[in-house]
Amino acid sequence: MRTEGAAVYLERLLQIHVATMAALGALLLGLGQRNPALPLWMLTAAITSVWVTDVTGWFRLNRAVTNVAAAVAFCIFLWQVSELRGLVRILAIGNLLVYLQIILLFQEKEPRTYGQLALLSLLEVVVAAAFRQQAMFGLLLIVYLFIGLSALVLLFLVRERRRHRPAASRWPPRAAGGRWPLAGQESAFTDSVSASAGQAGIGRELRRRVMRMGVGTLALTMVIFFTLPRWGRHPWRGATAGARHTVGFSDRVTLGELGTILENPEEVLRIQLSDFATDEPRRVGEVYLRGSVLTYYEDGEWRYRGPVEYDVVGPLGTVPILSTERLLRQKIIIEPMDHEALFCVWPFASAGDDPRLFVNPGRQLLLRRHDLMGQRFAFELATDAFDRNTQLPRTPASRRDRLEARFLASPPPTEGPDALPGLVALADQWLEESSLDRDNHDACARALERQLRDSGQFEYSLEGQARDGSLDAIEDFVSNNRRGHCEYFATALVLMLRSQGIPARLVVGYKTDEWNDLGEFFQVRQLHAHTWVEAYLSPRQVRDWPARDGPPPQTEFGAWIRLDPTPAGSGPRINRALDLFGKSFDWLNFVWASYIIEMDQPRQHEVIYDPLTDALSEAARRLVDPRWWQTTFDRIAGAVGTGLRNLILVLAGAVVVIVLVLAYRGFRAVLGRWLVRLAGRTARGTRSLGARVEFYRRLEAALARFGLVRSPAQTQREFARQAGRRIAESTGEGHLAGLPGQVVEAFYRVRFGGTTLDSTQADAVEQALRRLKQAAAGRS
């Protein structure tokens, strides 16, 4: 009964491991497809099948139902393949694997069924690797490795137990004796508690062996992954499973749309600012990343409208040349998006020759090639937009900006269906109360910005607001319901500035202050999407640049000043705690993307081959350079005193000799062990092991006195049973029959179990040998 219970326990472990393996495989596949349905279906099926199919046996699919279900799954697969195109067809393959696994989970399990489930799960992981994955995929893959190894080991044990069932469980029954008497014995598996009593434990021993195999596999995999040469110049970045929506940029922006996505923590990009000369990372304050500018507002909607000759895409060289002072390098990695738009700090210039980048000067829009938008994209630019770790609130204007400014100063109408009388009146009232010179555009613009942001008359809210349909949305915002998010505040300020004859435009992009200390970069998420305002100042107005805003722009065409009327402290915030764990995981994603996903041939040479080659070359150069040795010894002698110089030289020489001797002896030992294993012997290990099982040699010597010698075809246990029976028959003392077996069982524990005998066990062995010796002496 104990053996039967252990066998049930073993198979139950296998059932749980295989179900867990199936659920993890579906989870990895779901991460790649960004589809939570697959993991949930599989998790539900795995838990349910273990109980209703494996434990209780209440529900099991027969062969006919299984075949019909598999045929239906295959028809669904064919339909999905016909609906999908390109590499995305791999989605259908992943779905088919999940369907087949669910069907097999509800069958009565045989070793073949377990093997099929494990194979399908492994194929799911292969399919999942074809998609873009983050660091979570790698962490779960490590867990999957250990679960899979445990499942395969358990499957091997269950299969071997069923294959070598005892004779009593076979039909027709096999004789218990005969040539192989051990075939009639049932194998026993116990837990770690029973293992302490002298039996081989399946719990602790299995975990220990699987841990060693898993760690060894991971180490070997890392060595192969990082050192195996890449043949292609570009890494496999995965099949497209739905690019992310580009929040922060659109050809048209409608008031009210942005608030619905400002609580999404999904990562958009990460940006690292560093000194352009030393490449040392720089931490600054808030960072504004421009996407595009919008110039025309009508009926609650913004879009771009400007001279046709400016709304064209050109090479990156059309961006104005920057001053070399305060120059920083901005390294940006942007996630796959559904648009070619890129986001960066303006003004900028190319940090190198990158033919993948283009610019639309009219829309102030940086672009990449269309074929690159569906993959993670890394690029570098230079910028001088920071002074003393603060992003300057100005951007130099170009000749085109100066000509276009007149189109951006058209005041909103005060009559008609698109009239904004309340907005115009409120702007007039605020400037009248401020007693500012209306010709001082900079002061007037900042006064209106402060009123919207700091007066307390307006409230920031992400919730959708009820608006008066008979009024323009922004007119309702300033006159009736003064609640809204950044789009409303920025739109109100642009239109107020235009009502005063000040050219202004709306800017859409991202604003972030989320700094990651581990990776030394800024994290930009969907919830950081933001809109702000840029107002144009003519060259005459720039001459009166206030000192608080840093040095004046070095341009003859004027400048744009950045205005952010959104109330302070009301910007988007992450709705989950970004504690040390969260930032560590973000940094892990950065490492995963940079050194795993993007490990192509150039990156491998840059990160691994080149540093290793340089280190080895430098070490070799120093070892053969007498001046380096002389300098090193002089430094050591200078640190401890010149009187010890000779002693240090002697000690150093002695250390070198000792290291060489030890290395030589170690090499000989390793080579000797390898040769011994190759010859099928164990050299010194055999001698030490022989000393530990000397009592078995004494047993064979004692049995030889009875004329009993073990044949090469007999195991020690078979020989002991045969010898015990013959001794009992020849002496007439039945209690002697079990003594050889007692000694042999102790021999098995030492020789094959790797254990040592305690004092009680050793005394029992000695007593058995003594009694056998006495019986042999009495017989003679």
Image: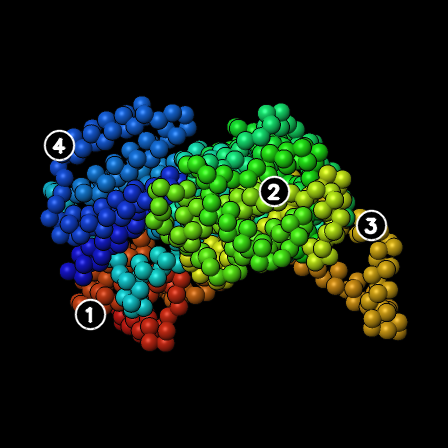
Residue at x-position 87% and y-position 54%: 626
Which amino acid is tagged 1?
His
Image side of residue 638 versus residue 24, left or right? right
Q: Quadrant of residue 79?
A: top left
Disc 4 designates what residue? 64
Which amino acid is tagged 4?
Ala
Give the crowd class for mark 1: few <14, some 14-19, many >=20 residues within 10 Å. few
Asked if the residues shown at circle 3 and circle 1 are in contact, with their CB atoms under 8 angstroms apart, the answer is no
Disc ID at residue 624: 3
Give the crowd class for mark 2: few <14, some 14-19, many >=20 residues within 10 Å. some
Q: CA distance from mark 3 to mark 4?
A: 77 Å
Residue at x-position 74% and y-position 51%: 544
Regarding mark 2 in the picture, which secondary structure is present there? loop
- Residue 583 on image: x %, y %: 51, 57
Image side of residue 136 versus residue 38, left or right? right
Which amino acid is tagged 3?
Val
Disc ID at residue 735: 1
Mark 4 or 1 closer to N-term?
Answer: 4
Disc 2 designates what residue? 501
Which amino acid is tagged 2?
Gly
